[in-house]
Image: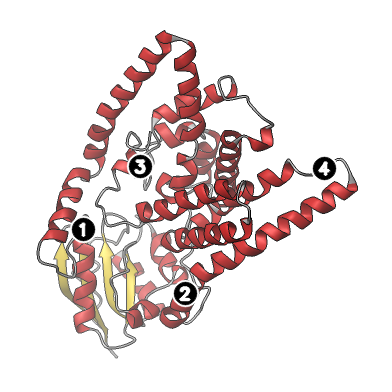
Amino acid sequence: MAVSSSAVVMLWGSGKTDLLAVGPAVAACVVMLVSWEAPDSRATLLVAGLLTGFACVFKLSYLIAFLPVVAVLAIWPILGRVQLGEPAGRRELFTLTFRAAVPLTIGFLLAFAPNLVKNHVILGNAFASNALDPFFSKATTMRVVLTYPLALTYGRYWGEVGTISPLVLAYAPLALAFHPTSGHWTSNRIFAMSAAAVAGTIAWMVLCPSALAPRYILVTLLLFAIPAASAAEVLSRRRALFSVVLLAAVLVVLMVTPAHANRDYPTLVSLTRTISSILGPQTTCSGSHPFERDCVASETINAMASPGDGVLTLTWVRFWLHPDLMQAASRTDETMPYDLCGPTCTPSAFWAIYRARPVFRFIIHDASSHFVPPGAFDSPPPDITVHRLFASGDISVYEVTLGS
């Protein structure tokens, strides 16, 4: 079900960190399940915390969508040991939950703390982060939320970059009727993974309702494949006809998904280039497809800038900038006026915004994601000089000098 999810296929060789976070996150889930039976669960929970911390470092959105998954898997076996109807049982629930939380938290901080140190060194603030701006208007956001989980499979929204396999959407409801029934529900790992996935998805919907991007919460969504696969297995064993239908569905989806991915994203090309860059000569921007232009743009600024020069980043891709330039790059509140100017913005209005805070010597502009009035850079006001340093496709770099 993972390879039939275009959100997975589209990330092959793309240079993004989304798939990098999948490994430690999946391992954390496995270790959490192992901790249910471990003689000394503290050591196991410590490892699970480490893996969770690594996953969150690789993809910060997992702080919202994956931490609830780990919390549910930690609390789930405890629920089977206590009597919630009794005051003593509720106290025991708190005690056992605290005992599990301590090694989990220690492991998490051991892995995540270096990220805080990095933030302090580069950005001057250990807890600095780029705000996740709303993807859409309130009306569109409401439509996205009301169409969960269909939007995760059939959505075609900006920034989505792939969807979850329709097999998950088709088979997961079957888990309500076809599932292993042995043992108490608190010992059922299928139920636990399902509840954990629901908790993580709901947390993301509540805190980031506008960000419909499966790659941000990939592991949480792929956990739904576990009850879906389990239900499909049970159903195929009970009825021979369904085994044929299920197999046919898998084959169809596997054939359709790569075609969909290739049409929307250069998946196989990026995978081929990544392999070539690993085997061939290494350069700074090799293996960064489809972001080579963004990389070269940043390297152009790195070669010319002095320490601390301001960079106005009218782009989403900025992580190739030198650390001192990253620290001096524009913040969300500084780029927001340019975004709010919108399609009706004029060149004079654009430069009026710039004059209000003329601290940026360089401007990186991605025309595919950030609007700039036509002619703004070609015909600036008389007291502003603009030199184009790099231009390729939608990506451009400019050096701006403000006269007296």
- Is disc 1 placed on a helix, strand or loop? loop
Between 124 and 158, the residue placed more toward the observer is: 124
- Is disc 3 placed on a helix, strand or loop? helix
Q: Are there few (<14), some (14-19), or many (20+) residues within 10 Å of tag 4?
A: some
Q: Which label's residue is closer to the chain start, 3 or 2? A: 3
Q: Are there few (<14), some (14-19), or many (20+) residues within 10 Å of tag 3?
A: many
Nearer the observer: mark 4 or 1; the answer is: 4
Q: Residue furthest front?
A: 39
Check disc 4 and give the amino acid type.
Leu
Q: Position of residue 283 (x, y in %)?
A: 14, 69
Check disc 1 and give the amino acid type.
Asp
Q: Which label's residue is closer to the chain start, 3 or 4? A: 3
The structure residue drawn at horizontal position 21% and vertical position 69%, both measured from the top left corner, is 297
Q: Is residue 400 above or below residue 180?
A: below
Label 4 – label 2 distance at C-alpha: 39 Å
Tell me whether circle 2 and circle 1 mark residues in contact (CB < 8 Å). no
On screen, residue 46 versus residue 279, left or right, reads right
Residue located beneath label 4 in the image? 84
Q: Which numbered tag is attached to residue 394?
A: 1
